[in-house]
Image (cartoon, coloured by chain):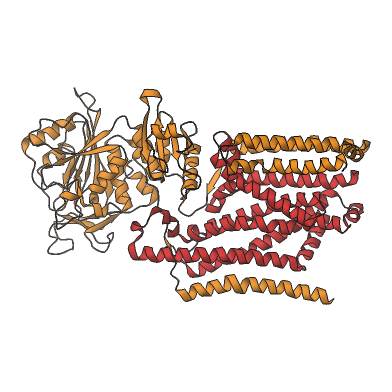
Amino acid sequence: MKSANIGKVLGAFGLLLLLSSPFTLFVTPDSAVAAAVKAGAGLVLLGVYGATNFRRFGQFATRRSSAFFATTALTTLGVLAALVAVNYLAFKQNRRWDLTRARIHTLAPQTKATLAAIADPVRAIAFITPAHPQYGQLEALFTLYHAEAPGKFEYSFKDARRSPDLASKYQVREGQTAVVLSRGEGERATHTLLSTVSEQELTHAVLKLNAVGTQKVYFVTGHGEWPLDKEQAPPDDPGASLSELRRQLLQEGYAAEPLNLAGVADVPGDAALVVIAGARVPFVAPEKAALQRYLAAGGRLLYFADAGLRDGLDELLAEYGVLVDEGIVADAQYNSGNPFVVLSLFYSDHVIGKPLAQQGLNVEFPTPRSLALLRMGMAPGVQAQPVVLTSQHAWVETTPQENAMPSDGEKTGQLVLVAAVTRDTASTPGRRFDEARVVVMGDSELLLDPNWGHEPNRNLVMNALGWASNQLTKVTIRPPDREVSTLELDAATINGIRFVSTDLLPLTLLGVGLAIWLSRRNK
Amino acid sequence: MRTALAIARKELSIYFTTPWAYAVFTAMVALTAFYFTDLLQAFNDVQAVARRVGWSQMSPDFNMYRNLTDGVVVELWGSVLVITLVVTPFLSMRLFAEEKRNRTFELLMTAPVRPIEIVLGKYLGGLGVISATLGLTLLFPLLLSAFGRSESGLALEWSTVLLGYGALLLWGATCMAVGLFISALTESQMLAAFLTFCVLLAWMLLGQVARRAEEPMRSALSYVACDLQLQGMLKGVLDAQSLVFFASVIGFSLFLTHRTVEAQRWA
């Protein structure tokens, strides 16, 4: 055989080796060297082809054509370089448009605010195999986070089998799918482990990681308040607990703990926030005094009243400019079928309600009480603002058992359902914060487990909690849910669709092709 | 441009009067229909279970079945992407290779037609036929919109559906450009089809290679992996970088084809 022919065979084999070298990486990911050797061998064999067929090239590249081929090679390189440059720019300055109806592929404002507030860079390591069904979802999420906060949020994917050191460091088992978020370096490095991959969880983890220590939220007990644990709920009303709220607090980096003020001189020093939810037995004087001292020193309080409850804290609340009205709020127009279950889409421009107003979300209050904002008689430096109000068609029903119509002497018009109060405490010696913050809500039932799924209410409470505890990054909307579209097909319809699409349609097209073939054959 | 359009018209008339194109149409529709009915059945079954037990009791893995667009159309477009990879080489293989085999290429080169017009004309012809092939798959979302329901009235999110379809067209146009270049290299149609398929398959598998690579190689490979570039568009997100990338590939392929055709004058 002539050397030129041998060269051709070797050249073809070389081309095969060169083109198939990426497959080697795909089949055996650890063998980058093998892939490189294959590609190198391929290039050598192509070189042999070039050397043995040099004369053929020589014939091909006549004097005139040589100039053409040289120009072509140079132009090709130039075009390639220009395209690489354009693509590099596009990669670095990418613009994206989420065209889905609910913007489900766009980060929630809460996530954006959280990422904007990151002080130290956060690194995410995903222990997940490329074949895992959630790999793509997680990759897309990480890409969005990185694009939103380049330099602050970095990520990488690891296989626990191929990175045993890392897996062992973060105590990730082989085969386990987990995301580790870490912050800081060396001994000061902190990390948190996630087993799910939703935006909600990831953002909560970033928040948790960035919280300077774990903030404690104390839930006052001892006056018949709603319990924190499901087990403590009354047997006849198993949903009457705050366990879902507690779970969410934990996710957001807070520790939720009960606090009984009886026999306690002061609210604990590590309290980021105190919550009084649905107290029904009056507080005693030393307890009231402890709360008074706490707020006077710049404490933070979330207070939830409810229909028919009396806890003896009227005086304390009045000091902060809020009076809880007697009776139950009813609304003739804005309700969910029952005038005592009040709907509201009326927000002031306070930071707690603003995100809800922007999204047009309606909050729902079952049997709330209204609030009166006082102008006189409160402690110095106090400013009270409404946050959520009823419509103009509301009234305070003082005799709900008797009727559900406004009567003479009952307060009517737009009523305040949620109020936010601040008090300047910058000059107070031994203060906790420079400003005391109190949020008063006329309804505590919206905290209960069965109601916690109502997203607008949940957002309202978490925003209030974020504002009161000074975690402004949490004052935003949680990620939206997808719209559910339904399909209910019986077997006959499915079979009909299957017949049309897999049988009738392809057969029709085949028939047209056959007709064309036959008519051409007969010509 | 008028000459290019005339060549494109001629190409299209050839495609639509040969049984071969209809065999390809049939294959495309049959394969897509197979995936469609499979996805529809799965969606219907999961929805039936969800109606019984409630979505809150369902695993998060079934979340995509909450929405008809996500559960059926996005998945269907993903499958059509792969089918296009198989179908396009059979449509592009004849563009230049057939002319070379039939010795009509020399005639074309001696005609008062510039190589750029030949390339553009043939590419536009190919583009027309791949658009028609992919257009047939729009029947399936139309079927879904007839049977599905949602709170807002529209069963499908047409913005997502049409953007996904746009991604298919973009991919089809890219495959056709690559196929055109390879067809210009050889006179064997089968070899052209085989090589086009190999190149496109390798390109599509690059995404898997990228996922196993470490940074910064991972980012670079992810950018050039066609399936990863198209993922966003299939789900309803338009990335400017994807448009730039595929436009670059199409442009470069046409440039190479032009140089190859031009080279025939010098050979």
A100 relative to B28 in the view: left or right: left
The residue positioned 8% from the left and 36% from the top of the image is A262
**Looking at the colours in the rendered structure, which chain would you say is drawn in red?**
B
Note whether A395 is above or below B259 in the view shown: below
Chain letter, colour orange = A
Q: Is residue A478 visible?
A: yes
Quarter that holds the C terminus of chain B: top right
Q: Where is residue A159 in the image (x, y as percent from the top left)?
A: 47, 39
Along the line of sight, the residue nearer the viewer: B139 or A220:
B139
Position of residue A150 in the picture relative to residue A466 (left or right) = right
Q: Can residue A123 be seen in this view?
A: no
| Residue A221: image location, x then y, percent | 13, 42
- Quarter of the image for residue A334 reads bottom left
Depth check, front residue: A324 or A352: A352
Residue that extends furthest to the front in the rendered view of this protein: A1
Residue A219: x percent and y percent?
A: 18, 40
As drawn, A382 above or below B30: above
Q: Which residue is drawn at 59% across and 43% down?
A: A26
Please indicate whether residue B45 sits to the left or right of residue A276 in the image: right
Q: In which quarter of the image is residue A178?
A: top left
User: In the picture, residue B102 is in which quadrant?
Assistant: bottom right
